[in-house]
Image (cartoon, rainbow, N blue to C red):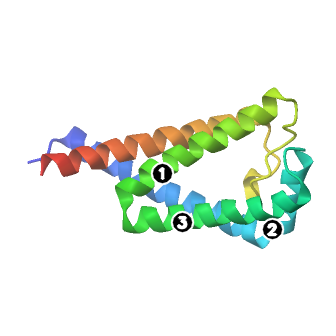
């Protein structure tokens, strides 16, 4: 029989997992619906030319949709790649902030307009959630 603490850990990992799926669905759909706004935010950073922003904006949306599918069909791999992606997004906003190019979050929806410190906290939370869920589900598979 599984101990109560392990059951609780599994429930928390599942909660994080479903939140990550929801979060990625939300941000991807918002970026897709407001593609021009997302593209404009990329151009404002001055890191992207308008042509490259066109390509990059679509690539980010495709990446988020791919992560959603990976999370749904290959949970552990999806969690691991989500963690790497959130690390990359965090590095991106940190570089922008360091160079003085970060104005506000351009992720869309309720996140749009977030200051750097709040965006950083959200990204770190997503990284921790994906690591925790990955390690929980990975250890469960290794015990069987």
Marks 3/2: CA–CA distance: 18 Å
Name the mark on residue 65. none
Instruction: Identify the residue position indicated by label 2 in the image.
Output: 35
Q: What is the residue that sits farthest to the bottom in this orientation?
A: 33
Q: Assign a secondary structure to mark 2.
A: helix
User: Which badge, 3 or 1, comes first in the chain's sequence?
Assistant: 3
Q: How crowded is mark 1: few (under 14 residues within 10 Å), some or many (20 or more)?
A: some
Instruction: Identify the residue position indicated by label 3 in the image.
Output: 66
Q: Is 43 drawn above or below residue 118 in the view shown?
A: below
User: Which badge, 2 or 1, comes first in the chain's sequence?
Assistant: 2
The percent coordinates of residue 79 (x first, y second) are 43, 52
Marks 2/1: CA–CA distance: 24 Å
Between residues 70 and 6, which one lies in front from this camera angle? 70
Position of 110 compared to 19: left or right? right
Residue under the image location 12 percent in, 52 percent down:
144
Name the mark on residue 81. 1
Marks 3/1: CA–CA distance: 10 Å
Between residues 134 and 23, which one lies in front from this camera angle? 134
The percent coordinates of residue 96 (x first, y second) are 80, 36
Residue under the image location 37 percent in, 48 percent down:
13
Q: Assign a secondary structure to mark 1.
A: helix
Position of 55 compared to 74: left or right? right
Q: Assign a secondary structure to mark 3.
A: helix
């Amino acid at each position: 029989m599984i101990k109560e603490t392990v059951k609780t850990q599994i429930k928390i990992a599942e909660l994080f997992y479903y939140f990550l799926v929801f979060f990625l669905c939300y941000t991807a759909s918002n970026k897709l619906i407001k593609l021009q706004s997302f593209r404009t935010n990329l151009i404002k950073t001055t890191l992207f030319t308008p042509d490259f922003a066109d390509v990059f904006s679509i690539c980010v949306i495709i990446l988020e949709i791919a992560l959603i599918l990976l999370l749904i069909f290959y949970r552990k791999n999806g969690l691991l790649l989500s963690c790497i992606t959130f690390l990359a997004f965090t590095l991106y906003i940190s570089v922008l902030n360091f160079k003085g190019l970060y104005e506000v979050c351009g992720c869309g929806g309720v996140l749009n307009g977030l200051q750097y410190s709040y965006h950083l906290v959200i990204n770190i939370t997503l990284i921790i959630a994906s690591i925790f869920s990955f390690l929980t589900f990975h250890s469960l598979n290794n015990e069987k």
